[in-house]
Image (cartoon, rainbow, N blue to C red):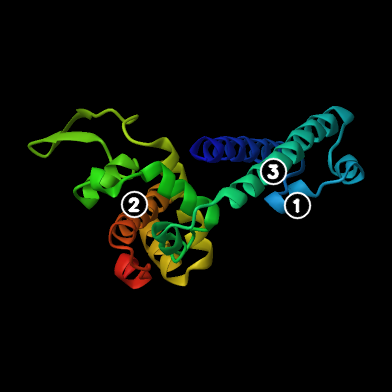
Amino acid sequence: MRDLLRKRAHLVRQRTAQVLSVHNLMVRNTGVRFGAKQIDEFTPSELASLLPNTEQVLAVTSSLTVLHCLGQQIKTLEKAVQKRLKHTPAYTQLQTVDGIGPILAQTIVLETGDMRRFPRVGHYASYCRCVGSTKISNGKRKGQGNIKNGNPYLEWAYMEAAQFAIRFSPTVQRFYQRKQARSHLMIARKAIAHKLARACYYIMRDLVPFDVHKAFG
């Protein structure tokens, strides 16, 4: 099951890469920004009217073909996962978190494993790659630790959860806007992923529902 979810995550990243490729090509040649849904629904006649030559149409069409194939395979994997999901208490409580649905909840449960491996919440956040690895001595930066330590699938899961939480939770959105005003967009999103990881540690350890005001108040 864990390998199946890892393969799904891999295909999702590839699908995102194809969407960005088409988006960048369209912006360069038309000056118009299209959303992911618009890109997915492009027809050959629409592309011919938007792009100046047939070579560009062919380039976008090839990306769209790969995009649709990846979408079908992702749906196939999701259906297989749904049939085999184990509704553990931790899995159930994780779905109370803004931005975490069945697939992300199962990914987090399987990649986390036994919560007794993490004596403190900081250990878990570090394992999820949600904290920096900068070495500081006497207030000065002396280098960087091994940024590849930890679990890349948990890092991806919490970044995905952060993206959805920003969209659907007003409380998280306000926190994101305040953080983004003082820093960079990715730093703000990483901060939300960090807070979600810390919240999920207690949710899985104590089997309690999510409280957005405790996490982002």
Residue 90 seen in the figure = yes
Q: Is residue 14 left or right of residue 34?
A: left
Which of disc 1 and disc 2 is earlier in sequence?
Answer: 1
> Which label was assigned to residue 65?
none
Which residue position is annotated with label 1? 38
Q: Is residue 32 above or below residue 88?
A: above
Q: Quadrant of residue 182?
A: bottom left
Q: What residue lies at 79% left-to-right and 31% top-to-bottom?
A: 62
Label 1 environment density (alpha carbons within 10 Å; few <14, some 14–19, many ≥20): few
* Mark 2 surroundings within 10 Å by alpha-carbon count, few (fewer than 14), some (14 through 19), many (20 or more): many
Residue 81 picture location, percent across and down: 59, 47
**Picture disc at residue 194:** 2
Q: Earlier in the sequence, mark 3 or mark 1?
A: 1
Viewer-proximal residue, 215 or 43? 215
* Amino acid type, label 3: Thr
What amino acid is at disc 1? Gln
On the rendered image, what quadrant is the C terminus found in? bottom left
Q: Residue at x 28, y 42 (%)?
A: 126
